């Protein structure tokens, strides 16, 4: 009987097919599920001039390739290390123009990949998304006309990919891949190229995979090569096997501060790294509730409570990367006044997770253990674009008096003094009826007269919102900071001081704001979390006390 061909190979054999100048998609989300052994193999091979395509949020997998000189251009909506800070080599290379950054948001990425996966030349998005400065600086966004109603649409091209690198929990020798927990954007990245190289923690028999064929996330016809390598995602996490090695990522970030240390790190890190034992660094929480229950509300607990009060029963929304206050606030709302509220958590897409501790990352698998459903990133992007979200929560590096948000750069876009992580989901803001912004630091550097780049369009000024088809009743609703709560004047759409947190004064808020706030003669204090709300936050949502340490 004729035998089916095995696709198993070494990492070196697998990446040898990738020519200089190729467009390569690298999977995983943030610091989870990244194909790091394949990344290291590309660096060892000294592959050059790559165009790198990433998932919606990427981390060390992209930064390491940039540090090693492999990347000429990057197509990504967000590059950072979550709570560990910005991606140092991405930031440096972008500021010095050593790489080309294709400035996009999540809509461009997700639907450009969808166009490529279906063979379409482009994807037409609602014209309201044209309010972002991504459209101004990136000529790949193009204005078009809907042939059925004559209205303007915003077109993004298919993101053509030559090769896709993924990491999965298990595979068979023929290339059928199974993720553990969630697949993030990996299946979409796979379909965009149809030439997948995958590392896996273990190769299992084909008959074993057939027993649970519904768990196969990427089928064999899309896969060229399988590399079996225990620990191949390290130092990122691999669901079901080991957690993120945060100490190693921080060691890399520290080494990136000067060229000699970085070169030494690269020489060490690109060696194959067999992981001998599972990580024991899962979040373990000792109950500190007894010590905290009498403490006054922390600043982050105040923000979480205000977020809770901003949502209503029956709404649908989500808590994104790095948004612990949002996750806590939404769960608090479910436990108090909005039992029918539905929300997703991070890139893993856990719907209505029940957690007693706020996890180190919202993109991890903690929420999957006790949730109602798993909403994949592809489906989540469809829902966002289609207007299914009732409210959205955002943050950034800058905000102006009309609520425009910047998460891209400080200074001119072509010569930035400081490069931020990227527009990420702010591009979807016009698709959501109302949104709430939160900031952990209220300073003149954050609240500026004019943002240097518009990642998410606010209320104006002027008639821009009308020109891009964004209704007047959409846009920012509240701004919550460590000092105060602001809303927007209905007539002028300018930011208005709604309340100041106890212990803070109106003058303090004004002194720390780079524009003139609309202020009434008497500004009330923010209503602090009630005793019942604090009990829920500290005993049912955040037993580990993460909120207490978020804001000094």
Image (tube, helix red, strand yellow):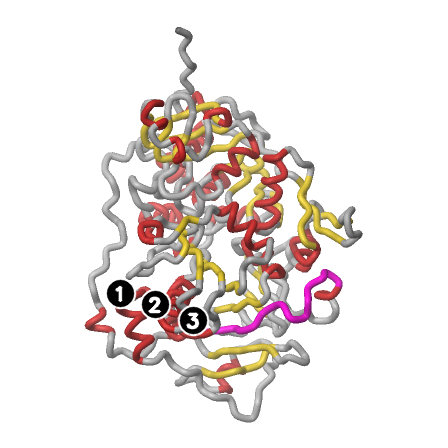
Q: Which residue is mark 2?
A: 547
* Outermost residue, top side: 1
Residue 524 position in % (x across, y down):
47, 88
Height in image: 97 above or below 529?
above
Q: Which residue is mark 3?
A: 308
Q: Is residue 469 magenta?
A: yes
Q: Which span of residues is magenta-colored?
A: 467-481
What is the CA distance from the residue labelled 1 to the residue labelled 3?
18 Å
Q: Quadrant of residue 176?
A: top left
Q: Which residue is mark 1?
A: 543
What secondary structure is found at the residue carrying circle 2?
A: helix
Q: Quadrant of residue 402?
A: bottom right
What is the CA distance from the residue labelled 1 to the residue labelled 2?
10 Å
Number of numbered discs on residues: 3
Of badges 1 and 3, nearer the viewer stands 3
Residue 407 position in % (x across, y down):
55, 59
Height in image: 162 above or below 246?
above
């Amino acid at each position: 009987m004729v035998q089916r061909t095995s696709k198993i190979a070494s990492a070196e054999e697998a990446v040898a097919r990738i020519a200089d100048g190729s467009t390569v998609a690298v999977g995983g989300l943030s610091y989870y599920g990244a194909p790091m052994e394949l990344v290291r193999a590309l660096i060892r091979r000294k592959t050059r001039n790559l165009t790198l395509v990433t998932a919606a949020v990427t981390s060390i997998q992209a930064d390491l390739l940039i540090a090693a000189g492999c990347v000429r251009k990057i197509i990504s909506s967000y590059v950072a290390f979550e709570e560990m800070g910005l991606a140092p080599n991405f930031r440096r290379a972008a500021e010095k123009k050593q790489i080309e950054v294709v400035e996009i948001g999540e809509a461009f990425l997700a639907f450009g990949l969808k166009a490529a996966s279906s063979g379409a030349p482009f994807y037409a998005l609602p014209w309201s998304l044209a309010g972002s400065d991504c459209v101004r600086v990136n000529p790949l966004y193009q204005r078009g006309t809907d042939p059925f109603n004559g209205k303007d649409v915003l077109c993004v091209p298919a993101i053509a990919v030559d090769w896709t690198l993924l990491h999965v929990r298990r595979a068979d020798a023929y290339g059928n891949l199974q993720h553990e927990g969630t697949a993030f954007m990996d299946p979409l990245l796979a379909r965009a190229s149809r030439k997948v190289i995958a590392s896996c923690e273990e190769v299992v028999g084909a008959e074993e995979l057939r027993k649970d064929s519904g768990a196969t996330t990427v089928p064999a016809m899309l896969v060229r090569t399988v590399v079996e390598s225990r620990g191949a995602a390290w130092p990122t996490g691999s669901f079901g096997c080991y957690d993120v090695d945060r100490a190693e990522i921080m060691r890399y970030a520290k080494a990136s501060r000067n060229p000699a240390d970085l070169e030494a790190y690269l020489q060490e890190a690109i060696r194959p790294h067999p992981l001998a034992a599972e990580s024991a660094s899962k979040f373990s929480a000792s109950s500190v509730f007894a010590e905290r229950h009498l403490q006054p509300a922390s600043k982050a607990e105040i923000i979480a409570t205000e977020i809770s009060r901003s949502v209503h029963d029956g709404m649908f929304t989500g808590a994104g990367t790095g948004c612990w206050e949002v996750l806590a606030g939404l769960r608090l709302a479910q436990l108090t006044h909005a039992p029918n509220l539905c929300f997703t958590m991070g890139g893993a897409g856990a719907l209505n997770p029940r957690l007693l501790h706020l996890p180190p990352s919202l993109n991890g698998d903690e929420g999957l253990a006790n949730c109602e459903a798993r909403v994949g990133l592809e489906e989540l992007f469809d829902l966002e674009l289609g207007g299914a979200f009732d409210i959205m929560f955002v943050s950034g590096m800058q905000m102006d008096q009309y609520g425009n948000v910047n998460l891209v750069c400080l200074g001119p876009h072509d010569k930035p003094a400081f490069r931020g992580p990227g527009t990420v989901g702010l591009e979807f803001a016009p698709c959501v009826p109302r949104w709430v912004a939160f900031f952990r630091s209220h300073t003149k550097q954050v609240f500026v007269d004019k943002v240097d780049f518009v990642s998410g369009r606010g209320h104006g000024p002027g008639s821009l919102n009308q020109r891009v088809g964004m209704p007047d009743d959409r846009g920012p609703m509240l701004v919550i900071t460590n000092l105060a709560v602001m809303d927007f004047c209905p007539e002028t759409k300018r930011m208005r001081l709604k309340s100041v947190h106890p212990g803070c004064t109106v003058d303090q808020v004004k002194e720390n704001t780079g524009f003139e706030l609309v202020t009434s003669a008497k500004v009330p204090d923010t209503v602090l979390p009630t005793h019942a709300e604090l009990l829920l936050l500290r005993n049912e949502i955040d037993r580990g006390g993460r909120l207490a340490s978020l804001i000094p």
